[in-house]
Each structure stands twice: as C-alpha cells, then as structure tokens.
Image (spheres, rainbow, N blue to C red):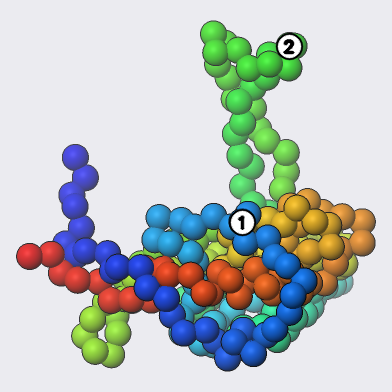
Amino acid sequence: MPRSPDFSLPVPRQHPLPSTLAAWSDRSGDYFDQIQPVSVGYLIWSKFPVSVYIEPATTTEIATPFTRQRAETWIRAVTQAVQEWQAYLPLQVEAAAEAADIKVLRSPPPLKLAPAPSATGADRPDRPGLVLGRARSAETRFELYLHPGSDNSSYLSHRVTIQLRPDQAETYLKAAARHELGHALGIWGHSPLQTDALYFSQVRNPPTISPRDVNTLKRVYEQPTRLGWPVSARE
C-alpha cells in the first residue's frame, strides 16, 4: 500500500482578489457552472506576478530559415497571448524554465489511447481494444508540490505545463495559446459559446478574451482553495 503523506492538507480558504480582478466590473454573464474544481479545490494562483516561461528557439531551429521562422512565429504568438492576459492577472515572462509557474513548450501533446469502436460504431465490451486518438494542437496539465516559505512552513502549490504545436498558422497559434493560458490561470473548463476564448473547440475566426472569460476568471478567484496555504505536519 502507498505510504500516507506526513502532512495534512490545508483547509480550503479564499485568497484576496488580485487588484486587477477586484477592479473588474461587468454584467455580461459567465460560464462558471462549467468550471470543475480538482482535488485541492480551484486552481488559483495566490502569489503575483505569476511567472511564465516561453520556450526559446533552439540552436537546431535557428540553423535553417524555415525552422527559425516557425519558432519565431510561435514565440510571437505565445508572447502576445501572455500580454493579453496580463490585463487581468499580473504575469511576468521568466527566462529560466525551472523557476517558472507556467511553462509553455513548443511541442505537440502526446497522443492518447481511446476505446476502439465496433463495426457498428458501438463499444463492444466482449472485444476490448484501444486506438490512437486524433492529434491535438495543445494540452495543459498541472502538478502539485510543496513550496517552502520564508516562515519555515511548506505551502501547497501547483505548476503548469502547456504543450503547443508549432505547425499552425499564427492566428490559430495565438488563439490556442490564449485558450491554454486561460486554463493555466484557473479556468479549468470550457465555455459553450464561440464568442469566448475558452470555447471548447477551434473556430474559423478565433475570439479575443471576452468579458465572459474575465467574469468567469473572477468568480474562480472568489472561491476557496487549498492552494497557497500552509500544510500541517501530522501528529
């Protein structure tokens, strides 16, 4: 059996709203009912600015005009998406990957296995099988860890990795980066409306960050979470 951790998770509590969200006031509605908390509550950052690492061009990419241009287009699209979200949460581009809260990497997400359908399109429990799912353009995932504080306490924290394929038009690259950064900043779910940046599917004319996106982000940051609070040692 796995060994139980030597600490107790903090009780969920609400953090003060960052000033950018506290000052935001709009009545366009939101899609907060589509946001899913995880095991520790809502994915809220409590220390600002949130640091973002944008993968630079490699020596191999710089060596040829095509790969250099593709890398530069990708970096420009991600940088612009970060700048857009900076209007609503304090963000800072970080040069070192190991020091960043959010890492944005220029790589395709791994393929996922899905249940193989039967010849009629229905699942057949008597004939189990797996097939590779369709290729995806981006993926955001998080991991939890304990961060040492200046008061000798350990704080429950998270860090996020975004994988974003480089072989897309710049418009769609920026839309994908904008969308995935929305997840990384706390919108762990999707909007049902095409006019929102966090719409669940890619559209022909990608929208910018909408008031509904910001309203949803603000409601997320008004929720209690275990993240950002000190853990307690077990007796």
Q: Amino acid at mark 2?
A: Ala
| Residue at 60% across, 12% down | 124
State left or right for residue 157 relative to residue 70.
Answer: left
Of helix, strand and loop, which one carries label 2?
loop
**Most distant residue in the front direction:** 27
Q: Residue furthest right?
A: 204
* Residue 75 in sight in this render: no
Could you say which disc has been placed on residue 33 in the image? Answer: 1
Q: Is residue 193 above or below residue 150?
A: above
Q: Nearer the viewer, residue 31 or 143?
A: 31
The one of 181 and 108 positioned closer to us in this rendering: 181
Residue 119, numbered label: 2
| Left or right: 71 as drawn, with respect to 152 | right
Is the C-beta separation of discs 1 and 2 under 8 Å?
A: no
Residue at the location (73% across, 38% down)? Answer: 134
**Callout 1 amino acid:** Asp
Q: Residues within 10 Å of mark 2 (few under 14, many from 20)?
A: few
Kindly indicate the quadrant of the structure image that contains residue 232: bottom left
Comparing labels 1 and 2, the label whose residue is closer to the camera? 1
The residue at the point 70 percent across, 65 percent down is 30
The residue under the point 28% across, 90% down is 150
